Amino acid sequence: MKKKFIASILTAALALSVLTACGSDAAETAQTTETTTEEAATEETATEEAAPAEEEAAETEEAATEEAAPAESKGTITVAASATPHAEILEQVKPILAEQGWDLEVTVFDDYVQPNLVVESGEFDANYFQHIPYLESFNEEQGTHLVNAGGIHYEPFGIYPGTKSDLTTLEKGDVIAVPNDTTNEARALLLLQDNGVITLKDGVGLEATVRDIVENPNEIEIQELEAAQVPRVIDEVAFVVLNGNYALEAGYNVVNDSIAYEKADSEAAKTYVNIIAVKEGNENNEGIVALVEALKSDEIKEYINNTYSGGVIPFE
């Protein structure tokens, strides 16, 4: 009986041990399952959170690739220009046009005849060097068919000191050099008249020549030279009257260096605006329109104002 009692106690103890062990294993299994589930949930959440960031990064990279990709080529625009300021301004326009797919090729000319002839012949698409009165005079004299595609800037004409620095000191025999082409000579003479040096016939306007001088109290000599040559005689004459671009090329600023100049709000500003000229019929070509719009952009206006300090004035 005693042995049976002891055996029963041992059996019960063994069973309790087994149950305890099973309970412990079950708890551990449950805990492990719970931990695994939590880890999986955390990983899934992290993956979900990372997905938008990865998508955003991919979109940013795609956008950057699109921005970096060059614009589809639309062709080449060829322009004949004077060196200063025209070709300099055109250089600033190249990146603007490149973004639109246009390649701008600029060729510098040092005279006022060839740039018009090469546009008339079709060798160049446009030129940038002249004002409207000169273009109209050239068409009439040469039989060309050039038109204004857009006004870009105005260059004030100025009277610059040579061997003298004050117009009131002029005396007989003094020489003043002026451009000899029709419209620019008239413009120079009108500026001299505005400053009391000479008097012209009434109404001659932009057709004025030295033959139209009716009063010359100091008996000065007007020396007519090709426009590009005028700056070269500045040390030999009392005064010179310079085109804006040739003054700039010679290192002069009309505001700082001239003794008198045309004002920005004058009628001359409208009359002598420098233009993009093309052969008649081409003024609405896509490339020409793009060129004019780029030249009239705020970016180029800012460049002109900052670079030329009043020697070149953007045309509104």
Image (cartoon, rainbow, N blue to C red):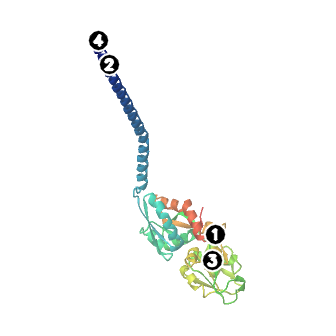
Q: Which residue is mark 3?
A: 188
| Of the two numbered discs 2 and 3 in the rendering, the one whose residue sits closer to the viewer | 2
Between the C-alphas of marks 2 and 1, the distance is: 120 Å
Relative image position of residue 33 (x, y in whole percent): 36, 29
Q: Which residue is mark 4?
A: 2
Q: Amino acid at mark 1?
A: Ala
Asked if the residues shown at circle 2 and circle 4 are in contact, with their CB atoms under 8 angstroms apart, the answer is no
Q: Which residue is mark 1?
A: 268
Q: Quadrant of residue 68?
A: bottom left
- Circle 1 — which element? helix
Q: Amino acid at mark 4?
A: Lys
| The C terminus lies in quadrant | bottom right
When the figure is inspected, residue 163 is found, relative to residue 133, above or below; the finding is below
Between the C-alphas of marks 3 and 4, the distance is: 144 Å
Between the C-alphas of marks 3 and 1, the distance is: 11 Å
Relative image position of residue 235 (x, y in whole percent): 60, 87
Q: Which residue is mark 2?
A: 13
Q: Amino acid at mark 2?
A: Ala
| Extreme residue toward the front, this view | 2
Kindly identify the residue that appears in the image at 68 percent across and 77 percent down: 193
- Whether residue 168 sits left or right of residue 132 in the image: it is right
Q: Amino acid at mark 3?
A: Ala
Name the N-terminal-most of marks 3 and 4.
Answer: 4
Between the C-alphas of marks 2 and 4, the distance is: 17 Å
| Extreme residue toward the bottom, this view | 173
Name the N-terminal-most of marks 2 and 1.
Answer: 2
Name the N-terminal-most of marks 3 and 1.
Answer: 3
Relative image position of residue 96 (x, y in whole percent): 48, 60
| Of the two numbered discs 1 and 4 in the rendering, the one whose residue sits closer to the viewer | 4
Q: Quadrant of residue 202?
A: bottom right
Q: Can residue 204 be spotted in the picture?
A: no
Name the N-terminal-most of marks 1 and 4.
Answer: 4
